[in-house]
Image: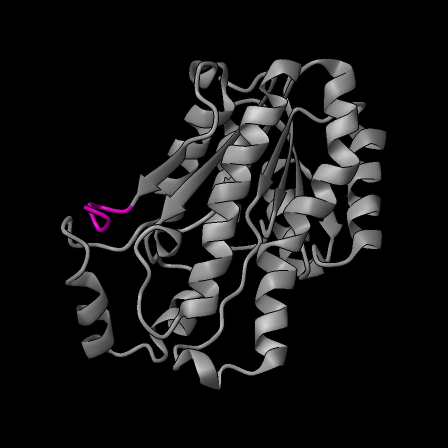
Amino acid sequence: MRLANKTAIVTGAGSGFGAGIARAFAAEGAKVLVADINQSAADAVAAEIGGIASATNVADAGDIGKMLALAIDRFGHIDIVVNNAGVTHLPAPMESISEQDFDRVLAVNVKPIYLIARELIPLMKKQGSGNILNVASTAGLSPRPNLSWYNASKGWVITASKSMAVELAPFGIRVNAICPVAGETPLLKSFMGEDTPQMRAKFLASIPIGRFSTPEDMANAALYLCSDEGSMITGVALEIDGGRCI
């Protein structure tokens, strides 16, 4: 029960890494708000773990405000936020990516961290504690060709996490990032461009351990960083990548 008496918000928690993190947090005693743009997916995970669901478009400031207000209303306070929701553009030469796709990547991968911080940080400062975990990617550390604007968005997440950490440490607020390699999530096909045995083999060849990451891998790391076991850790970008970034 490493998160007993803690409350948490996990975005993009209707599937993939977010769902894995939400399940692990609940199993360790946290009260969890499951946020996802897909209402039915959020409802299903929340029902499974005894949490509450919020249909949230993380790129929309109004939705962010409603999500945080719901958490405060139901929980009374917010201890942990996991900024997990993310999208990518399909693999293609950087100059061929449409402005619409570029804007969408930044709107979902970058802007929500700002929107949530703007509303949440004053509350965490007031309570003198808090934990923010941003889901970045190995793409922000060791970029793959033809995913340039996605890579750049995750590099931003890593830099933002470190900057937030150094500014907020005096207030008792820790901020970290985790950097997964490609995993068995709904985004995998988009990263690869096509889900074929040949393309999977190509991606796996770049991961020394020889497998994709799983929601459980992310959940285990998130639990450590967001629990008191990680109380001396802030500003890290933890690679959970089977050795890909070596």
Based on the picture, tell me whether residue 99 belongs to the magenta stretch.
no
| Residue 122: image location, x then y, percent | 78, 27
Identify the image quadrant of residue 58.
bottom right
Query: Residue sitting at 51 percent across and 58 percent down?
Result: 153
| Residue 119: image location, x then y, percent | 79, 37
Q: Is residue 173 left or right of residue 237?
A: right
By secondary structure, the bulk of the magenta-drawn segment is best described as loop
Q: Is residue 190 left or right of residue 192?
A: right
Front position in the image: 233 or 19: 233
| Residue 45: image location, x then y, percent | 60, 48
Q: Is residue 190 left or right of residue 48?
A: left
Query: Residue sitting at 57 percent across and 56 percent down?
Result: 109
Query: Residue sitting at 62 percent across and 69 percent down?
Result: 104
> Considering only vertical position in the picture, is 213 above or below 187?
above
Query: Residue sitting at 17 percent across and 69 percent down?
Result: 201
Front position in the image: 231 or 215: 231
Question: Bounds of the magenta span?
Answer: 241-246
Q: Is residue 209 visible?
A: yes
Front position in the image: 66 or 75: 66
Based on the picture, tell me whether residue 242 belongs to the magenta stretch.
yes
Q: How is the image coloured?
A: one colour
> Considering only vertical position in the picture, is 245 above or below 163?
below
Total marks drawn?
0
| Residue 164: image location, x then y, percent | 59, 32
Q: Is residue 22 left or right of residue 243?
A: right
> Considering only vertical position in the picture, is 186 above or below 133?
below
